[in-house]
Image (cartoon, rainbow, N blue to C red):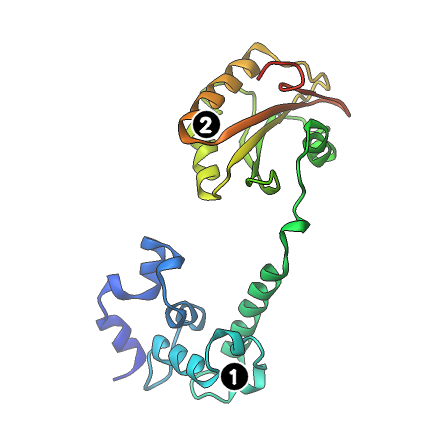
């Protein structure tokens, strides 16, 4: 029985790709993750079986990282194309693992937050509402754009902000948006949105540390102004 028949006969809820979509990548075993990268097996092995053989040949993922394309290509069912795909994915993982926490910007005050986004946001012709997601050390995990366009409470909804923050396991956020006019003075709408998001964050246990309004090479910090 060939691979395609095996996969067709396999219940949908057991197929690696469907499980990943439904339950997330963390629930998959190493062979299942590799099987998704390989996509197909050989004439007598499913992709999962081929992935299991590859892991067995190199005694796990750790040694697999050191394997060359030629070594991988020698396994029946692999070939140069699959071996290259696998090596590329492993190299991405290796590079991510080499990024240490010390490489992440640390926010010690409003000036740090403003400096991080000033050049990117000061010349935008529309209002961009963003969030800096921080860990417990106030290191930046990510910068997420929440909305683009004139700010109002229907556009900047707590659901959109905190859905991303929870997904990234952020412990705190700094709100950031620009004023295309170049004047960073907060508007009434800015203050209302800030209070709304601060209240939502307190319920979820995610602190809104500040709201930075970016103008033309100048900024206003809600925390510095005693508005937060």
Answer above or below: position of 127 versus 11: above
Q: Nearer the viewer, mark 2 or mark 1?
A: 2
Residue depicted at x 25% and y 71%: 8
Q: For the image shown, how many numbered marks are present on the structure?
A: 2
Residue depicted at x 46% and y 27%: 201
Where is the N terminus found, in terms of image quarters? bottom left
Label 2, residues with CA under 10 Å away: few <14, some 14-19, many ≥20? many
For residue 201, which numbered disc appears in the image?
A: 2
**Callout 2 secondary element:** helix
Q: CA distance from mark 2 to mark 1?
A: 49 Å
Question: Does residue 26 appear to the left or right of 89 in the view shown?
Answer: left
The quarter holding residue 80 reads bottom right
Front residue of 167 and 216: 167
Residue depicted at x 41% and y 70%: 30
Say whether disc 2 or disc 1 marks the residue closer to the N-terminus. Answer: 1
- Residue, far front: 137
Front residue of 226 and 84: 226
Front residue of 168 and 148: 168
Label 1, residues with CA under 10 Å away: few <14, some 14-19, many ≥20? many
Answer above or below: position of 2 versus 198: below
Question: Does residue 89 appear to the left or right of 38 in the view shown?
Answer: right
Where is the C terminus found, in terms of image quarters? top right
On the image, the x and y values in percent for residue 173 come to 55, 32
The residue under label 1 is 72
- Residue, far top: 188
On the image, the x and y values in percent for residue 19 come to 31, 59
């Amino acid at each position: 029985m060939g691979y395609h028949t095996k996969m067709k006969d396999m219940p949908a809820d057991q197929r690696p790709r469907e499980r990943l979509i439904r339950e997330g990548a963390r629930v998959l075993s190493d062979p299942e993750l590799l099987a998704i990268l390989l996509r197909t097996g050989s004439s007598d092995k499913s992709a999962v079986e081929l992935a299991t053989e590859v892991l067995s040949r190199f005694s796990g993922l750790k040694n697999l990282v050191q394997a060359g394309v030629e070594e991988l290509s020698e396994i029946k069912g692999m070939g140069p194309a699959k071996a290259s795909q696998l090596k590329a994915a492993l190299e991405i993982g290796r590079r991510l693992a080499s990024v240490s926490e010390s490489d992440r910007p640390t926010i010690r005050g409003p000036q740090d937050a403003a400096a991080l986004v000033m050049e990117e946001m000061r010349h935008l012709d529309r209002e961009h509402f963003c969030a800096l997601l921080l860990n417990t050390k106030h290191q930046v995990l990510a910068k997420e754009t929440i909305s683009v366009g004139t700010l109002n409470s229907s556009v900047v909804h707590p659901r959109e902000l905190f859905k991303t923050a929870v997904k990234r396991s952020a412990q705190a956020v700094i709100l950031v948006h620009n004023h295309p006019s170049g004047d960073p003075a907060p508007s009434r709408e800015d203050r209302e949105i800030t209070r709304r998001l601060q209240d939502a964050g307190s319920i979820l246990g995610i602190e809104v540390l500040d709201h930075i309004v970016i103008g033309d090479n100048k900024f206003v910090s809600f925390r510095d102004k005693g508005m937060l």
